[in-house]
Image (cartoon, rainbow, N blue to C red):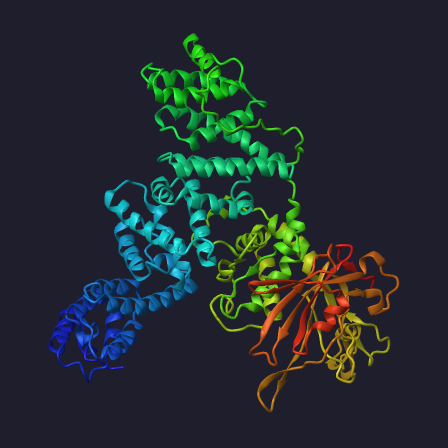
Amino acid sequence: MTTILDNVTTLKDKIKILDDNKNQTKNLDLQAIYKHIHNIGQDSNQLLEHALKINFGNVLKIQAQNDQNEVLQVFKKVCQTAKDLNHICIYVKYIQQISKQDLQKIYFKELGFQTEKLITEFRKQGTIIKELRLDTNDITKQRFMIQMITTLCPQDLGFNPELFSLMLIPFKCLHKADPTDISLLEKLADVLLSQCNGQGIANQNQVHDWLALLTGIIQYAYEGNSIGLFILLRKIPHQHINELLYRHKYFMLLNYFNNLKVTLKIFQGLTFYSITLQSIFFIRTISQFLYEYALEIKSKQYSDILKYIYQEFILTTILGNIQMIHYSTELIDLLLFYIIGMSSIDQDPLLKSLDLLYFKLKQASNYKIFTKDFKTQRILFLLTVAMNYNGLNTDEQFLNIIQIYQTTDKMIPYKQYIQWDFSQLIEQQSQIDQNILLRDSKDFVGLENLTNTCFMNSILQSLYMTQSFRKFVIQLKFTDQSLQLIPYPSKLSSLQKLFLLLTYQKQGYCSPYELKRQLREPYSNTNDQQDVSEFAHHFLEDLLELLPKHLQIPMEKIFFGYHRSCIECYNCPKRQPAYRPKEKFLGIDLHFNEDEENQDLYDMIRKAYEKEQIEFTCDKCNQRTDRVYKSQQLIQLPSVLFMIVHRFTFNAATQTMNKMLTKVPFKFQIDFRDVFNQKKLNSKDCIYDLYAFIVHMGKNSYSGHYICYARQLNKPDVWVTFDDTMISNLEYDSDQLDKELIAEETPYLLFYQNQSGQPLIFNN
């Protein structure tokens, strides 16, 4: 589109044209002019600055006027042509000069929408870090972008949840205590915490944001980004840390604190720059979790972590510097937790450390050991330790004080600590928590609908209720790079995170947003309803490709079967069938038997493997004939088999997909000896039980709703309904459940589990 700027090339000439026409813009195409400004290259920032300085086209109303809506529409079209976040920053600068706060909010809202679109586009292109200037150590460039983001969304980052994680990145880039940099990060931290606080962390969006903040802090501690970590951590009330850690207890243990060296690096990072109340509380809470979990699952792995932290962190970082630290109840609590706990296991390292500690404490108090502060804190601490350890090398004066305190009521009693008893722990490095395999149905939690994502949620819940797959996912081991959660975790780690939350979260619901943004298109970016069977195929196929080779085979055994094509030419004299190489398949497609009034699942399965007459040029007789029959021969069925009941047919007259509401009676148990009349099959591998199914509610494929029904194999009479965030139990037996489904609530995907837990091998 031609504009007044098209015929000039230099920046000076373009600025002159803007000046000459600033009072004659009524009949100009302002959207085209600003689009030109945005796209001219290296001079675009300077030209846009000038255009907004003179308010070219009156796109920014300084005061509220009658034509405000009209002006806003013009500005909306103008800012939609911005393709660089630098341009957004420039708009923010000039909007902040508007005196009316309500007008500022309106303009900022439109810029926020455009920022969201740009960030989504940059993420698809893989350039989001570069565009946000977060790939550089130049804090000036980062500051420019951070100010833009914090201005556009100081109260609600929900218009693009990805921004929350992206805004955490600058905290890891700061390595020096520059006052300007710290001031900027202080502001950024306040914005992040304002997003988290809201009405309290019971709100699901805030739970998601708090967890993102918490995992960011853990990552910074692991990487040693101490100053940024300190700024973030000290702003969080320790009661919030307590609630967060307890809410995500098992998620924390299984993701971050299941390795002794990783745990040590995190603890060291939490206290490197400064030992704060928050950091001590964090370490104490996680330490308690480690002890409880070691006993709960009888795992030597977690008791070894405690012993390692005791020797490499408590007796060095904490105990070695205690004379310089302000005593608090939390600090003493942390020290006594480890010292008393270890007293029955290994006394020698502590005795040496306490001798040194006692000497340092006397130095720190200038030998005035009778001061109130010393008596009420330092003396009582050593006294408590002395009650559990023999051989403390203390002087006679100190022993006299201890005796006085033991015979008076002056001593402030500490809580009773227990010595750790790890004698019953097994020698294995780990043992699977039984909660991974079994969970009471009353404790299930739902999944947030992210706008028409019921198709995804129903599949995820079905896969979660697949116990062999749940165990497989939660047991996946990643390298230390799995701690790199910002900005993008992998699809596998996101799925594991979601399964852990579904396993251990006791209330509310979980958000699959992090996983959704890892999916292939169109699932990652669209808000349109998708076909649940296509998504199931794409999702599992993509997961399989991401797995390392040694883990692909176990997953294939769960979901993937093998078959081969068989060609029989009746034109050939010997009629010997020709077999193609075996192929991997996922799921069985079931189609209706149109000639039969009553549908039977066994017949539908047989139909999927019956012979089909085709026209074909035979490889043996070299003749093209229609006396050729093609079929698929089953070689192996997976241990978990899902089948798709194809209910949608294309109507050429109406150009729509019609839905067949014909009822297919459930088979809650399938014996493949009866299906294919193969009595020689191994009986223990032939029986499959229905444990989950997905229904489609609606009359066509373009609308409707997907719901998952599932049961645990050890609770066959309790079916659980997973309807996004809503979870309910149905006290029906299988036959009752079949009768309860209404006509439009049609089973679409059926999930069966082999009773043996193994694949079914056919003897062809």
> Quick check: 165 left or right of 699?
left
Percent coordinates x, y for residue 529 in the rendering: 53, 73
Q: Residue furthest top?
A: 396
465 to 269, vertically: above or below: below
233 to 531, vertically: above or below: above
Q: Residue furthest bottom?
A: 653
In which quadrant is the C terminus drawn?
bottom right
> Quick check: 563 left or right of 129?
right
In which quadrant is the N terminus drawn?
bottom left
Q: Quadrant of residue 642?
A: bottom right
Percent coordinates x, y for residue 375 in the rendering: 39, 19
Q: How many marks?
A: 0
Q: Quadrant of residue 539?
A: bottom right
Which of 603 and 105 lies nearest the eye of the viewer? Answer: 105
Percent coordinates x, y for residue 294 in the rendering: 60, 36
Q: Quadrant of residue 271?
A: top left
Q: Residue furthest right?
A: 679
Which of 39 and 396 lies nearest the eye of the viewer? Answer: 396
Which of 702 and 739 lies nearest the eye of the viewer? Answer: 739
424 to 389, vertically: above or below: below
> Quick check: 215 left or right of 620?
left
> Quick check: 175 left or right of 384?
left
Residue at horizontal 46%, vertical 36%?
283
Which of 491 and 44 lies nearest the eye of the viewer? Answer: 491
Whether residue 408 is visible here, answered yes or no, is: yes
Percent coordinates x, y for residue 715 in the rendering: 73, 56
Whether residue 266 is visible here, answered yes or no, is: no
